[in-house]
Amino acid sequence: MPQCALTVEPIALSTLMELTRELSIGQRAADTPVRLHTFLHRRIFPKLGGYHTELYLRNSENTALRPPTSLQSFRLSNIPPELPLHEPLLLGALCSDQPVTLQTADEIPECLRTTSNSTHLLIPLIDRNTTVGTLYIGSKEPQVFSHDFLTGIMTFTTVIGSRLSSMRTIRQLKYSMRALEYSEQIRSALYEISEQAHSSASLDDLYGSMHKTVNRLIHAQNFIIALVEERSQGTFYQFPYFADQHDSYFQGQKVKLDPDKKSLTAYLLESRQPLLLTPENFDFICRKNHIHFMGTRPYSWLGVPFYLDHLSGAVIIQSYDDVIYTEKDKRLMSFVARHVGDALGKRQAIDELRTAKERAEQAEKNKSAFLANMSHEIRTPMNGIIGMTDLALELKLPPKLQTYLGMVRTSSDRLLKIINDILDFSKIEAGKLDLAESPFQLKPDISEALQLLTLNAKQKGITLKVDFDAELPDSVVGDSGRLCQVITNLVANGIKFTEKGSVTLSVRETISQPEKPDQITLHFQVRDTGVGIPENKIDQVFKAFNQLGTTIDQNNRGTGLGLVIAAELVDKMGGRIWIESIPGKGTTFHFTTTFARPSYTATAPFVLKTPISQPTSITTTLDILLAEDEYINQTLARTLLEHAGWNVTIAENGLAVLNYLTQKKKQQHFDLILMDIQMPDMDGFETTRLIRNRERSTGTHIPIIAMTAYAVNGDREKCLKAGMDGYISKPIKPGQLRTEIEVILHTEKERLANTGSD
């Protein structure tokens, strides 16, 4: 029979309330169940008297209630190590929401009988209507607990339960925060991987950057990228990146997929599913799938494939120590592999675009070099044809022969214009049609450009008129040559399509803009009385290779590029071009251009083209060294120079030039060198540089003028940079040649005067 229960309270109610207040304040520092348990045993439970008290919480398997810690200092024989939830007697007591006292033998579960206590008090810890634990109080003597005590002890356990609930909330918040931080780390890393496709200088840099990024998320000291390559001989996989502490020799290797002897990588790529190997399943998976492992066996292995439209492969990590990858790691690597594949796909596209760009640039360079070479090769014989024809026309010839040679000269001019149009159009296509910026005299330059067209108009019996606004400035800053090219193209077009009447060029200044006082916009009109253009064909005028076919003279149709080039030049000069036309009555081309106003007044004299028979302004006899390897061009240049009364010595290449200037037997004084560029043995550039180097020690300076068939954009600058003083392109125009010689010699004379040399 049970002993008589004592009626004395185990602890005064006031003391219990004081302990409850102490618990409420002191447990705030306890942020885990273990720390709370330690606090209770050290600060609270000893003050409950000679009773045996313990805190029990549900374990992770939900099979028993156990103390939060296994500290031996808190383990006593009269306190059960755990309260199993499978015992019906105990489970019934724990399911109550009120304190339960167990004293009789038939109501005490087996786990409590092992203690020396005769009274067992279980006070439930309830959170959200669920018992999460219990506070156990055991007494060796039989004990009866009053209602007030039980109410007080319930208040006491409510504080404990509230703290445990707060801990769970805090743990959940911390877990959510860690999950959020981890998610942000993943998002940031995946973004980095995507951006690295653009920022990495090369594929090797991209692979290395990816490795570092992934290694921040997961243990990835050993990081491998495999790519699939389809060939006519079969399917191969290669390792463009194989960072491994044991098997780095796989870097760059290519392996053919063998269905009878699959490696782990081959099986991964074939299965198209992520594969996780741990020490527990490694051998089983390899045996089951007949996998032949290559290289050093890892402790854990994780591979994830990726598949894109034009790229497939896998990302692999492996460990050789105690790191074991998990399903969580596999999910993470699935995201990583997808982004790695996307990044590699982007990089592949970028590299392909860069390669295509480099090929296009190289093709453009080849095209430019081809055009420059063809320009030189065509201009060289053209120089002979035009020059020798001009010389022949100066002779007293029978009228019929004079007529024939005139036709040759006209055909040569047309051919030269076609060549120039094709070269200019090629520059437009390449985006390399540049404009010069220098002061020029507006009216004289335009008038000179129209001189030849005046003769053409006269031959057709039509009038060419020029109407300059009286208020036009004397000079502007821009590209005189390109402006005159536009004007001559439009005027020549007007003459071509006009059989009677006139072609008129008028130039006016538009209303100036007060906010741009340093600029001037001019309005040009080229009006003809020709056949006009049908309205449905006006839009085709500025299309390349387009010929309207409205001219009666079918032998003078041209390339269809002149107006295209004119429109492009007008656009580059900051203007626009448009057409007004009435079929049967005529056409008016309008265009505007914007020029800068010069900061000074241009005073350079206007020089007209000089006919061959006109004497030069140089009164002294010049000794000229002509560097030219082509016989016809030698003959032409010698004839032109000797007509001017000058002495000519011919050198067939650069070495011959240096011999004339340095060897005592041949050494003589030359006033000027006319230097061809493309010559055998030593070209004009190298010859000029050697001459200038020699002059640094002698203090002398002989004027050198480039006379070359190289006439594309930049050739003049190359010649001047090499040390030449002037430049003239072939075909040589006699007046232009003499003018260039006069200008260079005048400049040299002023230089000598300023330096005090003779």
Image (tube, rainbow, N blue to C red):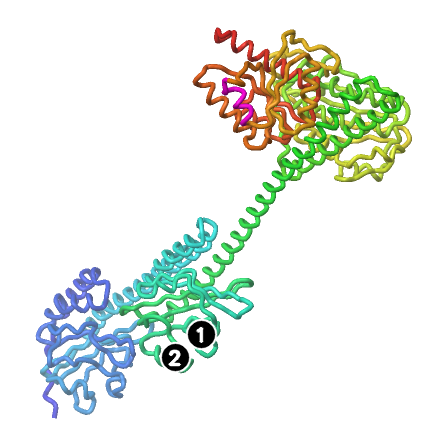
Q: Is the N terminus in the top left, top right, bottom left or bottom right quadrant?
A: bottom left
Instruction: Tell which residue pokes out farthest to the front in this image.
Output: 665
State left or right for residue 534 relative to residue 285: right
State left or right for residue 294 relative to residue 748: left
Q: Residues within 10 Å of mark 1 (few under 14, many from 20)?
A: many
Q: Amino acid at mark 2?
A: Ile
Q: Which residue is mark 1?
A: 267
Marks 2 and 1, the one that precedes in the sequence = 1
- The answer to whether 441 is drawn above or below residue 14 in the figure is above
Instruction: Identify the residue at horizontal 78%, vertical 36% (top origin).
Output: 560
- The answer to whether 208 is drawn above or below residue 561 in the figure is below
Provide the secondary structure element on which disc 2 rests: helix
Q: Residues within 10 Å of mark 2 (few under 14, many from 20)?
A: some
Q: Is residue 658 magenta?
A: yes
In the depicted view, which residue is nearer to us: 703 or 151?
A: 703
Q: Give the magenta-colored segment's residue range.
A: 655-664
Q: Which residue is mark 2?
A: 285
Q: What percent of the width, then of the height, locates residue 625?
A: 59, 19
Mark 2 or 1: the one toward you: 1
Q: Amino acid at mark 1?
A: Tyr
Q: What percent of the width, then of the height, locates residue 702?
A: 54, 16
Q: Is residue 16 magenta?
A: no
